[in-house]
Amino acid sequence: MQVGVAVGTTNSTVKHSSLLGWKLLVVQFYAADGRTPDGEPVIAVDSLGAGMGQKLILSSDGKGTRALLQSETTPVRWSVIGIQD
């Protein structure tokens, strides 16, 4: 799990069938201090309805993401599993 902030949304005209109907967020991870950006932004599937600027808890658990999207062949790596208060 990692903590990041939603910095944007994205969409695609051509996408894997497992992504149809899902909201895709651009997320910037933070370093351990919770303020310093860490690495390049990633794209994550959002099933919780997170908004721009919200701090998120993300998971790269492939099995959990495959279950969420109900697809054994989804190319998704990151999914939103929580929104910080």
Image (cartoon, grey):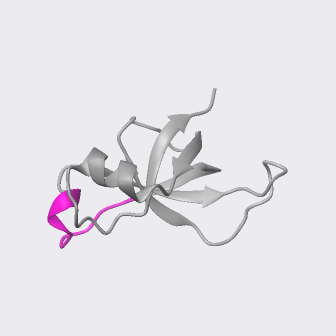
In this rendered view, identify the residue nearer to me: 25 or 74. Answer: 74
- 36, above or below 14, in the image: above
Considering every residue shown, the one lying at the far front of the view is 63
Report the side of 42 relative to 46 (left or right): right
Q: Is residue 41 visible?
A: yes
Q: Where's residue 79, x and y in %?
A: 43, 51
Report the side of 40 relative to 11 (left or right): right
For the record, the magenta segment spans 10-19
Q: Is residue 53 visible?
A: no
Q: Which residue is drawn at the image coordinates 78% and 48% (left, top)?
A: 34
Q: Where's residue 69, x and y in %?
A: 25, 50
Q: Main secondary structure of the magenta part?
A: loop
Report the side of 34 relative to 70 (left or right): right
Q: Which residue is drawn at the image coordinates 38% and 48% (left, top)?
A: 64
In this rendered view, identify the residue nearer to me: 75 or 50. Answer: 75
Considering every residue shown, the one lying at the far right of the view is 33
- Which image quadrant for residue 40? bottom right
- 42, above or below 47, in the image: below
Quadrant of the rendering where the C terminus is positioned:
top right
- 30, above or below 84, in the image: below
Residue 15 part of the magenta-drawn span: yes
Residue 46 part of the magenta-drawn span: no
Q: Which residue is drawn at the image coordinates 61% and 59% (left, top)?
A: 28
Counting the numbered discs, the total is 0
Q: Where's residue 36, x and y in %?
A: 80, 58
Q: Where's residue 9, x and y in %?
A: 41, 56
